[in-house]
Amino acid sequence: MDQAEKLRRMVKESTTPRSVARVITVTSGKGGVGKSSISVNLAIALQRLGHRVVILDADFGLANVEVMLGIRPKLNLADLMFHGKSLNEVITKGPENIGFISGGSGIQELVNLSRDQIVYLIQKLVELDECADIIIVDTGAGIADSVLEFVGASSEVLLVATPEPTSITDAYALLKTLNRKTDITLQDTTIKMIANRTDSYEEGKELYDKLSLVVGKFLNLNLEYLGALPMDPSVSKAVMRQKPAMLVYPNSQFSKTLTSIADDLCSNSTDSLMQKKGIAQLFTNLLRSRIK
Ligand SMILES: Nc1ncnc2c1ncn2[C@@H]1O[C@H](COP(=O)(O)OP(=O)(O)OP(=O)(O)O)[C@@H](O)[C@H]1O
């Protein structure tokens, strides 16, 4: 049995009879549109619905999620990959018991892993699949290869866009570049758009209608709509306090809308079961070309 077959078996055997986490990858075409704010607060909303949630910060270089959660993780994914640290040691507990893993330099190091290291990492991620119900992956923005690969390897993607024209064109550019990459197939990826910093529900819906029209026409992709989050000063006030808005401003329009979006994400049980492919599977997809 070759290495690739061994790995496929390992993921299959380890995940099939046990629980596999639902992985939601949050991304955007342009930076600063609210990815981290949404990841952090969505994590709390989902945890409150009774799910065990872990955030994996794959936006290397920026530590926005840590700041927003008001935590300082001592270890990161690289410690799990190279320094023999256990999964429990690299998960930092945040508010309301949500888990947090900092990608640190681990995400960049993925390209340099040997096959044995890949197998070891996937084994660890199978453990993560068992200890979380939902894993939110916060990626960087834009069309860097590392972001595209993460998005392409995911089965459920939340695409964040704001009504600013540059945000819409960059969201389209992200999907177009993804679609053009020959090594990425979006067949198994569900892309759901979330409008952020909108003045009204209608403005968000209009933004979605515009984007989904061109995405359907020119890229032949289906874009689902998750909803519109309002422009709400409580979001930046919460960042200043280094606490998630869901915690310090639970009655703000932003928190209420996000709670109902979290509800929608979980209410369609077939949808959520279909999405349950797990973080080990995501990394296997991501590293597929390296283990052939
Ligand atoms: N709905 C909102 N209402 C008001 N302010 C918001 C809203 N969403 C995000 N912001 C503010 O926008 C700024 C950028 O948000 P955030 O850091 O979440 O974006 P990002 O897409 O993760 O950025 P980056 O690309 O740098 O990782 C922050 O100051 C945040 O407080």
Image (cartoon, helix red, strand yellow):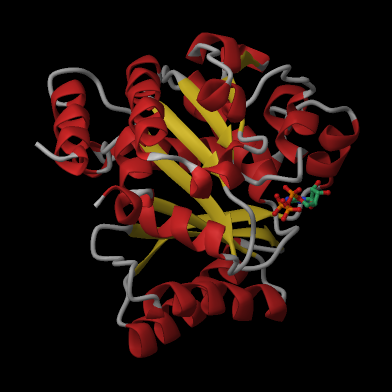
User: Which image quadrant is residue 242 in?
Assistant: top right
Task: Please state which of residues 61 and 117 is positioned toward the viewer in this rendering.
Answer: 117
Percent coordinates x, y for residue 182 in the rendering = 33, 76
Quarter of the figure with the N terminus: top left
**Viewer-side residue, 211 vs 31:** 31
- In the displayed structure, would residue 187 be above or below residue 256? below
Q: Could you tell me which residue is drawn at 48 percent across and 77 percent down?
A: 177
Q: Residue at x 69, y 52 (%)?
A: 34
6 left or right, relative to 171 = left
Give the residue at x 53% y 72%.
174
- From the viewer's perspective, is residue 95 above or below residue 292? above
Q: State how many labels appear.
A: 0
Query: In the drawing, does residue 177 fall left or right of residue 281?
Result: right
Q: Kindly give the residue lying farthest to the bottom in the view shown.
A: 218
Q: Is residue 274 visible?
A: yes
Note whether residue 101 is visible: no
Left-right relation of 249 to 15 = right
The percent position of residue 83, horizontal first and vertical second, equals 58, 18
Instruction: Name the foreground residue: 68 vs 121.
Output: 121
Residue ranking furthest to the left: 1
For residue 222, above or below residue 61: below
| Position of residue 143 measured from the top left corner of the image (x, y, whole percent) | 58, 69
Residue at 43%, 86% (x, y): give it: 214
Residue 189 % position (x, y):
31, 58
Indicate the quadrant where residue 20 lies. Answer: top left
